[in-house]
Every structure is written in C-alpha cells, then in structure tokens.
C-alpha cells in the first residue's frame, strides 16, 4: 500500500463505506462493488473500502473484537501480533511500572494499542509512511500516545522531555528476499535493540521462534509462545519486564495460558511405554522437553527425537498424548498389512526423524477400509519405527 491509498483508507468516507460492507461475503464482493460504482461512488474509494472490510473480517479470529475498529493492510495483518499475545506483552510493562514506552517498530500499532489501553503513554515509530498513516489512526483513541514516521533508533535519542522508561520492538524479519532467520538481518538489527536494555527500566523484543539459543543474551528471559498449537513468536525480556533469566514456554489454548520454565536439559531416553506424548512446539523450541519429561514422569523415545513416552499419563497443556496401539518396523509392506487388518482406509500421519513423507507413504499403503487411524513415523531407540496410536 502506498501513502496515498493509506490516506484514502483512513478517510471518513472510506471508513463509513467499509462499515456498510462489514458482512459482505467474498463471493458477493464483485457484484456489490459494481453496484456501488453505478450508484456514483468513486472507484478508488470502493476498492479501498472493500479491501478494508475484507481484511477486518479476516482479522477477527486473530485480533478479536477490535478488528472492526482497525485500519489494516495485508502485509501488516500478516505480521500483526495476536490480540491475546499483545495483551501479555503489555502486562509486562504494567508490572514493570512503566509510564511511557517506545514501540520501535509499531507496524499497524497492535502492540502499541495494547500498551496504551493499559494507561501507558506510547511513542510508536514506523519507518514506512503508509503504515504510519494507518497506525496513527489505530492509536487515535489514546491522545497521550503518538506515531512518529521515521527511524526509531535515531528518534529514540531525540525524545527530550518525552523520554521513555520502557522499550518494545518487533524487528522486521521479512524483506523482498523473503523471511530472515539470522538476527543480524533483522531491521533494526537485533544487537542494536538489545544494547538498549541497560538504558531503560524494561525492554521487550519480539523475535522469530527459530532464533538460535546462542543469539540470546544470558542475562535475558527468553519465552517461546504458542497459540492453539501454533508457535507464533519468541519474546526476549530484560530489566523489570523480565521474570528471571532463562527459558520458558507459554502455551495458550482456548484463551487459557500455561507457563513452563526450567533448565534446558534434554533428558534421558528409554523404552517405549503405553503412551506417546508430543510436546507443544513452544516447549520444544525453548529446549524444555527434558523439564517437561521430569515433571510428568516420562522420558524420550530416542535421544535425538522430541517425542516422550510413559507408562501412565496425566492431562497436561504442554503435550498431546496418544495411546500406543501397535508398534511396527518402518516397513511399508508390513505397515500396509497391519492397517488393512484393522480395516483402516485413511491415516493421519505424523513424522519426526525419518525421511519418508506422508505424501510418499499414503499411495503406497493402498488403503480401502472404513476406519481412520493416526500413524506416527519416528525413531525409537535408534530404529525407524511406525506407531499406530489413538489420541487420549
């Protein structure tokens, strides 16, 4: 989106028209758009309002009730922090006692809104002019907060009387060349942002969940976050926003949040028990599989694989449990015969530590039964193994 389109999007005429288009189904957009143009509405205005209404509908699952009050563009929505996670970011700054926070990379302003909604003044920086126009509109309900179009690290040093006691950053991890996994390629550079931790009361940095553990300073808290099974980010926290150096996993499911913290010891491997447990991705990314195993009385199925096994299992938000029905060598003919004997016609396939893909395996099984089963392809005690399991 260019700056001119952004200014059109935030205009009263576009906002009013987008509200009228709030519940237009995607299949009806072309017909409704043509009707509005016949009625005399400007074509560019109709296109902007239709786009905004569609993005708002799409955003509801991710951003909650606030979606219908926001102005959005596609790239910003794809990168926006989920509402539940933005709220947890904001609570860190509340707990730290911050009065004014700088958001160095505000994007559409979702994190800035969450912080401002808790009574903290926000100075939000955005390098892209069009995005800054939208963010300014999204932050408008909080007059003590503002959006600055420009370089954040340069602007931070020139705030004067508006000096901040907290800093939040979500460095850009995408460019025209695609997604960046190396923190040195973030914009602004991750090391430049982390240098701020000694100059403010609280610092929070949202980074990609694939960040190498070696890139995380030892004096910061690193927390990996998953929402309904998807690992969405890692957060690095320093100063009064930190709850203690080390690694933690925050698992959010159906709106409930559960936290696991501890040492990053991988744990021991042992024989396969009656149950297989698949740790949440945030637990795996945080390196806390061994900690989880110790807490629930489980052990690894293989020293190199992040599956756990136990003789008994209790409900835990940090792993999904399966009852092991049958254990077989990973041999396609034997596996197909075992599944046919169970009248299986469809399989949900999970894999970890094997090269065979579900797309390669399914046609070779030639299943025609009536039942559906779950199949796990992995290594157990160093051997390629197929497990027929059922969810607990």
Image (tube, rainbow, N blue to C red):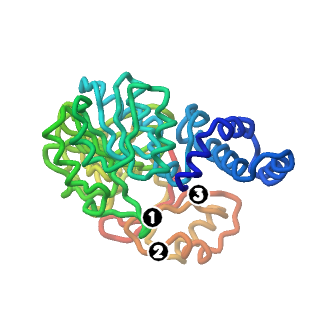
Which of 244 and 19 lies nearest the eye of the viewer?
A: 19
Residue 284 visible, this orientation: no
Q: Residue at x 72, y 39 (%)?
A: 17
Secondary structure beneath label 2: loop
Residue 356 numbered tag: 2
Q: Would you name the residue on which mark 1 appears?
A: 351
Rendered image quadrant of residue 167 = top left
In the rendered image, residue 358, in percent from the top left (x then y), is placed at 53, 69
Q: Secondary structure at mark 1?
A: strand
Dot label at residue 373: 3
Disc 1 and disc 2: Cα gap in Å?
8 Å
First-in-chain label (2 vs 3) = 2
User: Could you tell whether 258 is left or right of 246 in the image?
Assistant: right
* Quarter of the image that includes the N terminus: bottom right
**Residue 118 left/right relative to 21:** left
Packing grade of label 2 (10 A; few <14, some 14-19, many >=20) is: few
Of 118 and 13, the residue lying toward us:
13
Cα–Cα span, label 1 and label 3: 14 Å
Q: Give the crowd class for mark 1: few <14, some 14-19, many >=20 residues within 10 Å.
A: some
Q: Which callout, 1 or 2, points at the residue further toward the start of the chain?
A: 1
In this rendering, is residue 252 above or below 334?
A: above
Image location of residue 7, percent across then percent down: 57, 45
Give the residue at x 56% y 67%.
Answer: 338
The secondary structure type at the circle numbered 3 is: strand
């Amino acid at each position: 989106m260019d700056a001119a389109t952004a200014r059109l999007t935030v205009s009263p005429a576009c906002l009013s028209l987008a509200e009228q288009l709030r519940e237009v189904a995607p299949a009806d957009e072309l017909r409704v758009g043509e009707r509005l143009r016949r009625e005399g509405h400007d074509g560019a205005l109709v296109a902007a309002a239709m786009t905004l209404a569609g993005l708002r509908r799409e955003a509801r699952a991710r951003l909650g009730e606030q979606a219908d009050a926001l102005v959005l563009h596609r790239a910003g929505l794809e990168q926006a922090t989920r509402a539940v996670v933005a709220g947890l970011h904001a609570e860190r700054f509340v707990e730290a006692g911050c009065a004014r926070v700088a958001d160095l990379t505000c994007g559409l302003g979702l994190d800035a809104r969450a912080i401002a909604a808790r009574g903290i003044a926000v100075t939000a920086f955005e390098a892209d002019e069009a995005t800054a126009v939208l963010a300014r509109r999204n932050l408008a309900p909080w007059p003590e907060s503002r959006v600055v179009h420009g370089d954040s690290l340069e602007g931070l040093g020139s705030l004067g009387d508006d000096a901040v006691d907290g800093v939040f950053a979500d460095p850009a991890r995408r460019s025209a060349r695609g997604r960046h996994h190396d923190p040195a390629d973030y914009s602004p550079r991750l090391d430049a942002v982390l240098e701020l931790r000694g100059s403010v009361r609280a610092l929070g940095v949202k980074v990609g969940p694939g960040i190498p553990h070696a890139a995380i300073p030892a004096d910061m808290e690193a927390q990996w976050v998953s929402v309904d099974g998807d690992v969405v980010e890692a957060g690095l926290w320093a100063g009064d926003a930190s709850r203690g150096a080390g690694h933690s996993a925050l698992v959010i499911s159906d709106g409930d949040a559960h936290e696991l913290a501890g040492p990053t010891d991988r744990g021991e491997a042992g024989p396969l028990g009656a149950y297989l447990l698949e740790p949440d991705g945030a637990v795996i990314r945080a390196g806390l599989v061994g900690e989880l195993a110790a807490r629930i009385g489980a052990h690894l199925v293989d020293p190199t694989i992040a599956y756990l096994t136990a003789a008994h299992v209790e409900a835990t938000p940090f792993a999904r449990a399966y009852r092991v029905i049958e254990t077989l060598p990973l041999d396609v003919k034997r596996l197909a015969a075992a599944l046919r004997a169970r009248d299986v016609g469809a399989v949900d396939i999970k894999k970890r530590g094997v090269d065979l893909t579900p797309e390669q395996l399914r046609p070779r099984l030639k299943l025609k039964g009536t039942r559906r089963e779950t199949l796990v392809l992995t290594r157990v005690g160093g051997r390629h193994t197929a497990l027929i399991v059922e969810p607990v």
